[in-house]
């Protein structure tokens, strides 16, 4: 082979080796049958005490929007993803930033056009390719704590369609044992408590009569003592206890 042809052949080989390789499209997780925690909305970390969740079934998605529950349909084809109309409960939440976060989530979901994997996480993108939601795998579920023998701390009071957190700095405890409910709000309290399956019957609350001077604590105690006898059912999920009344009011606790 002549020197000229050798040079040309070498140049062709180098050119082939340096030619750009088309990038493979990002892999997408198969969403049906998966559950996620929404870690970021438009690049902003979600509120740790009101983290949204998403649970995908065959063609339905549901979860916690931040305060309210939502459900609706979705369609996935490879990386392409779209959501249909959502139904959502209409409870008002008084904690700072929660309702704003819920609105931001709803707005982001309406713009989703695709999904891609990011390590063990997933990212939902709009039509321009911007990441609008970052999803992470939820932590392993904690084993259910026993209702009786656990000290429970009040963290949420829901009356009608309004939910609020326990007064900042306050600590309301509750313990179920030997057919009674005892605890401390501002005052120590006690009531009978009959448990049958997931049903609950709490008698009138008796308490000490100490004055409570911290802002909001006395009002919280009064509401708690009024609500407790109306609770008719309970559910323990991991380290959370929820007492519910027939009218939908509820008391939420976390294990200490």
Image (spheres, rainbow, N blue to C red):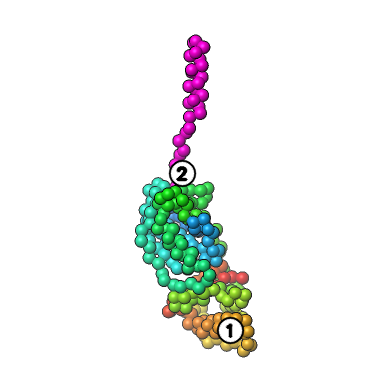
The residue sitting at the top extreme is 2
Residue 171 occupies quadrant = bottom right
Relative vertical location of residue 56 with respect to residue 89 in this rendering, above or below: above
- Which corner quadrant holds the C terminus? bottom right
Disc number for residue 218? 1
Residue 109 occupies quadrant = bottom left
Q: Nearer the viewer, residue 181 or 172?
A: 172
Disc 1 element = helix
Can you give x and y, in whole percent of width and height, for residue 71 in the image?
40, 63
Which residue was labeled with disc 2? 26
The residue sitting at the bottom extreme is 209
- Is residue 26 in the magenta section? yes
Residue depicted at 42% across the width and 60% down the height: 107
Q: Is residue 183 left or right of residue 107?
A: right
Mark 2 / mark 1, whichever is N-terminal: 2
Number of labels in the image equals 2
Q: Nearer the viewer, residue 218 or 107?
A: 107
Contact? badges 2 and 1 (CB < 8 Å): no
- Is residue 92 in the magenta section? no
Residue depicted at 62% across the width and 85% down the height: 212
Can you give x and y, in whole percent of width and height, for residue 103 in the image?
45, 64
Q: Nearer the viewer, residue 93 or 238?
A: 93
Chain part drawn in magenta: 1-28
CA distance separating discs 2 and 1: 56 Å
Residue depicted at 48% across the width and 66% down the height: 100
Relative vertical location of residue 110 with respect to residue 27 in this rendering, above or below: below
Disc 2 element = loop
Can you give x and y, in whole percent of width and height, for residue 206 in the image?
57, 88
Residue depicted at 47% across the width and 68% down the height: 99
User: Does the image show residue 230?
Assistant: yes
Q: Label 1 crowding class (10 Å Cα cut-off): few <14, some 14-19, many 20+?
A: some
């Amino acid at each position: 082979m002549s020197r000229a042809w050798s040079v040309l052949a070498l140049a062709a080989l180098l050119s082939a080796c340096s030619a750009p390789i088309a990038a493979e499209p990002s892999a997408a997780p198969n969403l049906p049958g998966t559950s996620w925690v929404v870690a970021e909305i438009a690049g902003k970390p979600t509120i740790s005490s009101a983290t949204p969740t998403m649970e995908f079934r065959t063609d339905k998605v549901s979860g916690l929007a931040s305060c309210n529950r939502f459900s609706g349909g979705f369609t996935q084809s490879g990386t392409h993803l779209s959501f249909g109309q959502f139904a959502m409960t209409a409870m008002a939440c008084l904690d700072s930033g929660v309702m704003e976060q819920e609105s931001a989530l709803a707005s982001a979901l309406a713009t989703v056009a695709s999904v891609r994997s990011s390590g063990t996480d997933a990212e939902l993108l709009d039509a321009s390719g911007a990441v609008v939601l970052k999803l992470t795998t939820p932590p392993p579920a904690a084993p259910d704590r026993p209702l009786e023998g656990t000290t429970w701390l009040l963290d949420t009071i829901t009356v009608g369609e309004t939910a609020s957190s326990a007064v900042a700095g306050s600590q309301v405890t509750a313990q179920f044992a030997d057919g009674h409910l005892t605890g401390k709000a501002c005052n120590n309290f006690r009531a009978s408590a009959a448990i049958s399956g997931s049903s609950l019957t709490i008698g009138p609350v008796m308490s000490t009569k100490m004055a409570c001077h911290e802002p909001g604590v006395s009002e919280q105690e009064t509401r708690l003592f009024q609500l407790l006898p109306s609770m008719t059912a309970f559910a323990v999920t991991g380290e959370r206890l929820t007492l519910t009344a027939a009218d939908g009011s509820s008391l939420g606790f976390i294990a200490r």
